[in-house]
Structure formats: C-alpha cells, structure tokens
Image (tube, rainbow, N blue to C red):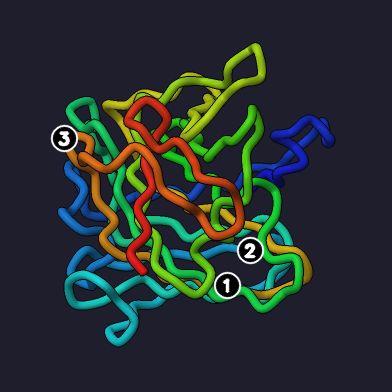
Amino acid sequence: EASEAYWTGHETEAVFDRQLALGMPVQTQPPEDMAEPAAGAWTAWADGATASATYDTAMKIAGDASVHFVTDGGFDTYVRYPQDYNARWDLSGAASLTLSVYADNQNVHRFQSGSPWIRLVDADGDFYQYQYYVNGSPINFLNEAIGNWQTYVIPLQASGPDPSGHSEGWIRTVQGAPDITRMHLLEFHSDTWDYGFQLWLDGVRFEAGLAALPDKYTVAHSETLDVSPAAGLLKNDS
C-alpha cells in the first residue's frame, strides 16, 4: 500500500501490495447496504499500526449493524469493502455514494490530511478519490462526525479541482485511468494527529440519483457550507 506521501509527491518510490481474489465468489453488483453483516466482511489497514473492522449491532442508525473500525495508527488508515468477494461492479448507472459515519477521536487536534478521502478502485488498481473542499483546499470534514452521525451523499461524477483555486464541496481526483464499469474496491481513508481513533460506518450504498437536501447546513467547526447538488451534499443526523 503506497503512503499518502507518495501520492502527494514527497516520495518517488512505492511498493504496492495487490490482493488477488483468486477462487473467491464474484460480486457483480454491490449490496443495497454494504454495512450489513449479510454483505460480508470488510478489511482494515493502518500504516505501521494495527487496525480492525467488525460489525457492531449496538451502534448503528440503519439495518442490523454498522461497520466498526478501530486503529491505534497515526498515519494513513483505511477500512475497505469487500473482503469476501471478487467485486466486479459496473457503477455506470450509479449517481452517488451515500454513507453515514460516526467518529470517536480523543486526540487534541483530531483528524488531519483532509480526512476522509474515499476511493473507488478498479480491477487494475486505478482509482477515483473524493474529498470535501472549502475555499479551494480539502478540509478535515471527518471532524464534523466526532460525537455525532453525519451522512455524506457523494456525487460519483463530482468535478475535479478548480484550477483557479475555488473548489467547493465534494471534489473528485483521478489516479491512472479508472474504469467505472470494473470497480473492485471501496476504501474509506482517514488520518489523525497523534495516534488512535474509532469510526462507525452505516448505510453504505450506491444510489441512482442524488438525494434532495437543503442548500445550506451549519457545521460545528466551520462556517455554513454550500451543500447544493453542484457542490456535493452533507446531512447532519445528530
């Protein structure tokens, strides 16, 4: 797994681990809710640390359970779906990725590095990456989920960064030449100051249309954000 330093140009070499799903059942369509036990297992990873992903039937807002991610890491981490299947998703008919997240981060400075960044990885390892931008730069949007559930509705065809530096909302960047008809993995990445945090993910699903939400939401640690469909969407479920 390449570190974030590689993708941002601070390192020139990286070693990639490719997990081959030989002999595993083929999953041609993602489940209606990837955070349900019936969907199969998730896997977890942390750079230089430990991480786990299990189902939690007590802490949830939809269905039977949520995915509980725990790490003692202090660098790049992710929770990834699927673990039990060889996914070959054609997402050309999907408009958005919807998920709810709750965070427990006791570190003083909380999350960093523009957390979260969410990747859709195709069968060749190329990917789309989604982050939330304000005033032209990715923000630590995951801080808004500390102590309360937040629901993200992420347009899969979100705009790329604005060359003039005015990007707002969910922005999509591209690594390689990802094929939306051959998607293989969904990854939720995050990074904290200091070490250790927990996340719960629930209601993780792809949808054919963007949900209708008000144009403005007031967020606890920043000014009111534009969450119109053009910018990307946020919903506070607390």
Crowding at label 3, few (<14), some or many (≥20) Cα neighbours within 10 Å?
A: few
Q: Earlier in the sequence, mark 2 or mark 3?
A: 2
Residue on which the image places disc 2: 46
Image x and y of residue 30, in percent: 21, 48
In the foreground, 67 or 142: 142
Kind of element beneath mark 1: strand
Kind of element beneath mark 3: loop
Label 3–label 1 contact, CB within 8 A: no
The CA distance from mark 3 to mark 1 is: 32 Å
Say which residue appears at 48% left-offset and 60% top-offset: 79
Label 1–label 2 contact, CB within 8 A: yes
The CA distance from mark 1 to mark 2 is: 6 Å
Figure check: 230 above or below 36 = above
Image x and y of residue 95, in percent: 24, 31
Mark 2 residue type? Ala
Crowding at label 2, few (<14), some or many (≥20) Cα neighbours within 10 Å?
A: many
Say which residue appears at 79% left-offset and 34% top-offset: 13
* Residue 46 seen in this snapshot: yes
Query: Is 195 placed left or right of 149 in the picture?
Result: right
Residue on which the image places disc 1: 51
Figure check: 17 above or below 36 = above
Mark 1 residue type? Ala
Give the number of the mark in front: 3 or 1: 3
Crowding at label 1, few (<14), some or many (≥20) Cα neighbours within 10 Å?
A: many
Residue on which the image places disc 3: 208
Label 2–label 3 contact, CB within 8 A: no
Identify the image quadrant of residue 195. Answer: bottom right
Identify the image quadrant of residue 196. Answer: bottom right
